[in-house]
């Protein structure tokens, strides 16, 4: 009877030992599993942190960045790229043709199958607002020489292209404006040398034409120098408190004779306000606007200069005529250099085409802005705003 008891006791001991080892093994396995999961979580957090840092870095770049995988699918597109191409949706995982349908860009990526990189490729985006991009692209290869992906960097050239176009247009316009009076002067001088000088009446008429065109050249060169100084920032403004009404009265007095020659009545509605401005430049602005209104307004019409206080601690000044007005499509362009609403009439009146451009630059250098409104057949009004002098009496805002 002892052996069965001993045998049962041994079996019980073995079962107990087995259960103990099994429990211990389970705890060890769970501990190991928890440790592995903790390591995996730490690795995921580290990976996520690196990805976040990369995204912050890429999105802080001014250049657009596009990263493609070996199948040509988009893996990364930073914020600058999305802005350049007007992309609002998530385009990751899609090809260039699926995402943007730009054949030129897709062809550029395909060309990297035969060449490792392409530098300085220029792309004009097909949109209403012209946008030029310079692209540097390179294929990425792994250790076995197999193409692993593509990286493209985009630089926005739009501003440079606009400046180049403006420079070319400026040179062409200056050349044209100089050529016309020079050709007239040369033609009349040659005619005088050929014998017209012996006819006093003809000679006087020709000399008057030469003098008129020489004066036009002088005005053009002076305006070119002025606008060059304004654009370069070399002009130093002597800012001070300037009472508006006396300046308006002075300018209207200077143009009284010219206005009377066309039968134009001059009226001042200038308020008793002071602005923070350079008095000489303010007179130049008002002089250009009043001169234009007399030239292109209605003969025997009325020209009014006035102003008012507006929000933001500024004074709004206007010069208004009751002439034929300005077409709507020309209102946004009248402040461009050499732009003329009526080219033939402008040249006949002796304008250089730079007066309103000078007005715009002077006002902007004061921290103000300038604009125009018009109703065809009912005249045009030119506005500008300047900072009101802080020591001036503050009237109720209109």
Image (cartoon, grey):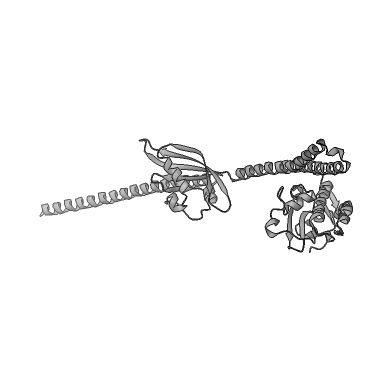
Q: Nearer the viewer, residue 204 or 69?
A: 204
Camera sees residue 45? no
Would you say 91 lies left or right of 211 here? left
Residue at image location 77% in from the left, 64% down from the top: 378
Residue at image location 44% in from the left, 48% down from the top: 74
Residue found at the very far left of the displayed protein: 1
Q: Nearer the viewer, residue 259 or 153?
A: 259
Camera sees residue 184? yes
Quarter where residue 375 is shown? bottom right
Quarter where residue 328 is shown? bottom right
Q: Quadrant of the N terminus?
A: bottom left
Would you say 269 lies left or right of 123 here? right
Q: Quadrant of the C terminus?
A: bottom right
Rendering coords of residue 137 (x, y %): 47, 40
Q: Nearer the viewer, residue 394 or 287?
A: 287
Q: Nearer the viewer, residue 128 or 206?
A: 206
Quarter where residue 5 is shown? bottom left
Rendering coords of residue 56 (x, y %): 52, 46
């Amino acid at each position: 009877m002892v052996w069965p008891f001993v045998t049962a006791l041994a079996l019980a001991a073995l079962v107990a030992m087995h259960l103990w080892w099994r429990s211990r093994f389970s705890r060890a396995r769970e501990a190991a599993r928890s440790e592995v999961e903790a390591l995996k979580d730490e690795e995921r957090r580290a990976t996520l942190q690196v990805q976040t840092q990369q995204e912050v870095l890429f999105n802080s770049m001014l250049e657009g960045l596009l990263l493609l995988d070996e199948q040509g699918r988009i893996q990364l597109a930073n914020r600058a790229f999305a802005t350049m191409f007007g992309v609002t949706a998530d385009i990751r995982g899609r090809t260039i043709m699926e995402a943007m349908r730009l054949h030129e860009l897709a062809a550029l990526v395909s060309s990297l199958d035969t060449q490792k990189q392409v530098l300085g490729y220029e792309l004009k985006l097909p949109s209403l607002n012209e946008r030029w991009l310079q692209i540097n692209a390179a294929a990425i290869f792994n250790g076995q020489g197999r193409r692993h992906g593509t990286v493209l960097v985009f630089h926005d050239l739009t501003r440079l292209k606009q400046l180049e176009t403006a420079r070319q247009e400026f040179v062409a316009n200056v050349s044209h404006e100089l050529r016309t009076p020079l050709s007239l002067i040369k033609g009349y001088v040659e005619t005088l040398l050929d014998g017209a000088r012996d006819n006093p009446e003809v000679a006087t008429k020709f000399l008057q034409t030469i003098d008129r065109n020489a004066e036009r050249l002088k005005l053009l060169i002076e305006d070119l120098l002025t606008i060059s100084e304004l654009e370069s920032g070399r002009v130093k403004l002597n800012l001070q408190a300037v009472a508006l009404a006396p300046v308006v009265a002075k300018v209207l007095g200077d143009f009284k004779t010219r206005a009377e020659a066309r039968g134009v009545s001059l009226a001042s509605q200038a308020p008793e306000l002071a602005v923070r401005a350079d008095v000489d430049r303010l007179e130049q602005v008002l002089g250009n606007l009043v001169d234009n209104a007399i030239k292109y307004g209605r003969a025997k019409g009325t020209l009014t200069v006035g102003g008012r206080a507006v929000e933001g601690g500024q004074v709004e000044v206007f010069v208004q005529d009751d002439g034929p007005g300005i077409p709507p499509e020309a209102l946004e362009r009248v402040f461009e250099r050499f732009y003329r609403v009526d080219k033939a009439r402008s040249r006949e009146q002796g304008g250089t085409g730079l007066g309103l451009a000078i007005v715009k630059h002077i006002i902007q250098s004061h921290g103000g802005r300038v604009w125009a409104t018009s109703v065809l057949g009912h005249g045009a009004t030119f506005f500008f705003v300047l900072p009101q002098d802080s020591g001036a009496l503050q009237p109720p805002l209109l």
